[in-house]
Image (cartoon, rainbow, N blue to C red):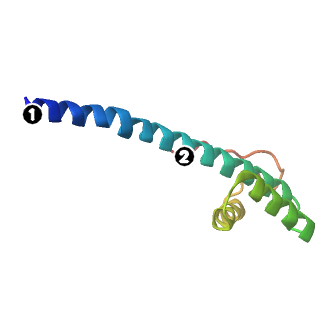
Amino acid sequence: LGRLLGGFTAVLGVGMIALPAGVLASGFSEQMRIRREEYREAVERVLEDGTITRRERRILDETRLQLGLSEEEAALVLEDAVKHPHTCPHCGLSAHVPPVV
């Protein structure tokens, strides 16, 4: 009877703690992905002319703070946007390529 009760308690513990924690972590990851994408869009807007002015840098810093991104995350997004632009450098049209899954 003790083993049965212990097993039931373990299963119940997983259901009450681990599963909701996984759901919360998944939701958090999705929100961070959305925030990084919003920041990426802001970066692409200021990079349209190929340079980032002091004013544009301030705008990016304010955007980063509003989105709750760290300086490191923002730097990675900026680096990726420079290396892999989502717009055609010749015509300026979207060159969005769906991510490989």
Horizontal relation, residue 19 to residue 61: left or right: left
**Kind of residue sitting beneath label 1:** Gly
Q: Residue at x 49, y 44 (%)?
A: 25
**Kind of residue sitting beneath label 2:** Ser
**Total count of labels:** 2
How far, Cα to Cα, is label 1 from label 2?
39 Å
Horizontal relation, residue 93 to residue 76: left or right: right
Q: Nearer the viewer, residue 49 or 17?
A: 17
Question: Where is 64 relative to 12, above or below?
Answer: below
Q: Residue at x 73, y 48 (%)?
A: 38
Q: Residues within 10 Å of mark 1 (few under 14, many from 20)?
A: few
| Quarter of the figure with residue 65 | bottom right
The secondary element bearing badge 1 is classed as helix
What residue sits right under mark 1 in the picture? 2
Q: Nearer the viewer, residue 14 or 9?
A: 9
Q: Position of residue 16 (x, y in %)?
A: 36, 33
Q: Residues within 10 Å of mark 2 (few under 14, many from 20)?
A: few
Residue 29 numbered mark, or none: 2
Q: Residue at x 61, y 47 (%)?
A: 33
Q: Position of residue 76 (x, y in %)?
A: 64, 64
| Quarter of the figure with residue 84 | bottom right
